[in-house]
């Protein structure tokens, strides 16, 4: 389990990235949702020992990650948002390099490990191909392969599916689902709601450096059940409606604007009809500070 307590981080110039963040991520898949600039990457970098918090604690498996960074790195696998690769190295050479960095000294053992990892991420056929020619999805699969070196009990992935096409996203989802088990916590940081709804047993939403929700996807849907309404309107009316209603999302469709509204007190207007709640509704309401 990853346990975070009262984590604070303020950058130079007084920019507060984290304001007393506390959360617990048990074994399995845990999703951290939030818009860009919400504090997700700052939190992930602290948990990955790459950034020092101003105060607070981060523990994994009883180990103090902030105080014992060397020990933490032995149980940690990390795929950052920007995963740098040497374009002239092959996939096998890349993993061999990372394995050596992680202390796998035996050459034969390292070779067997590289082969097993490439097989696991379905890149065995690309072992001798230079990674400079890899697609975005292949690069991400290679990234998760290096994160799995050393059989980590905590794996952190930051915005791993951004920019991937639907096929590669599905392939990456399947890979992450295989990694998470009763002995491994995978923390998925993302702004893509479908990543969490497809994969995660538990989730949290971060906004402006604070956790505004922590629950299961099922609990999130139950919380807003009966409170989501939808209507289609002429564009001229949208500004007035947004000024007095809690609008979750809006979408232009065939010249009209389709509004989804949060209203726990009943129908917000005769032109609105009840709508089946989605995890996106819950996310947008909390990420924008709409629902309470």
Image: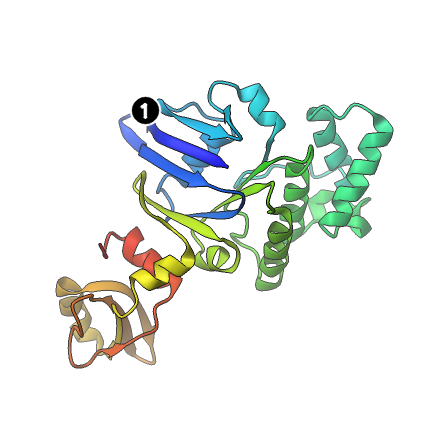
Instruction: Please name whichever residue, 187 or 107, is drawn nearer the observer in this view of the structure.
Output: 187
Residue at 61 percent across and 47 percent down: it is 181
Q: Which residue is mark 1?
A: 12
Q: Position of residue 277 (x, y in %)?
A: 34, 68
Q: Position of residue 182 (x, y in %)?
A: 59, 45
* Residue at the image position 58 percent from the left and 21 percent from the top: 71
Label 1: element kind: loop
The image quadrant of residue 102 is top right
- Relative image position of residue 85 (x, y in whole percent): 65, 37
The answer to whether 200 is drawn above or below residue 244 in the figure is above
At a point 22% along the width and 74% down the height, the residue shown is 235
Q: Quadrant of residue 56?
A: top left
The vertical placement of 150 against 124, above or below, is above
Identity of the residue drawn at 63% across and 47% down = 179
Give the answer, above or below, for where 253 lies relative to 133: below
Answer left or right for 255 relative to 188. Answer: left
- The structure's colour scheme is rainbow
């Amino acid at each position: 389990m990853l346990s975070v307590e009262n984590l604070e981080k303020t950058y130079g110039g007084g920019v507060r990235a984290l304001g007393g963040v506390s959360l617990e991520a048990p074994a399995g898949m845990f999703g951290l949702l939030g818009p860009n600039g919400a504090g997700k990457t700052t939190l992930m970098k602290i948990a990955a020992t790459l950034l020092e918090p101003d105060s607070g604690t981060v523990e994994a498996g009883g180990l103090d990650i902030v105080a014992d960074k060397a020990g933490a790195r032995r149980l940690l696998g990390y795929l950052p948002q920007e995963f740098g690769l040497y374009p002239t190295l092959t996939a096998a050479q890349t993993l061999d390099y990372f394995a050596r960095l992680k202390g796998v000294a035996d050459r034969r053992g390292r070779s067997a490990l590289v082969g097993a990892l490439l097989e696991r991420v379905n890149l065995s056929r690309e072992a001798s191909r230079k990674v400079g020619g890899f697609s975005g999805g292949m690069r991400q699969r290679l990234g998760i392969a290096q994160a799995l070196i050393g059989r980590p009990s905590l794996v952190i992935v930051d915005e791993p599916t951004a920019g991937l096409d639907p096929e590669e996203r599905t392939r990456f989802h399947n890979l992450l689902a295989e990694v998470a088990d009763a002995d491994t916590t995978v923390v998925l940081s993302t702004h893509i709601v479908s990543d969490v709804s497809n994969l995660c047993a538990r989730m949290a939403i971060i906004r402006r450096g604070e956790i505004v929700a922590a629950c299961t996807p099922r609990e999130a849907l139950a919380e807003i059940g009966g409170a989501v309404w939808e209507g289609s309107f002429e564009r001229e009316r949208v500004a007035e409606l947004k000024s007095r209603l809690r609008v979750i999302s809006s979408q232009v469709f065939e010249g009209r604007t389709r509004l989804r509204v949060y209203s726990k007190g009943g129908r917000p207007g005769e032109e609105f009809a009840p709508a089946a709640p989605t995890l996106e509704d819950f996310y947008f309401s909390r990420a924008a500070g709409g629902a309470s």
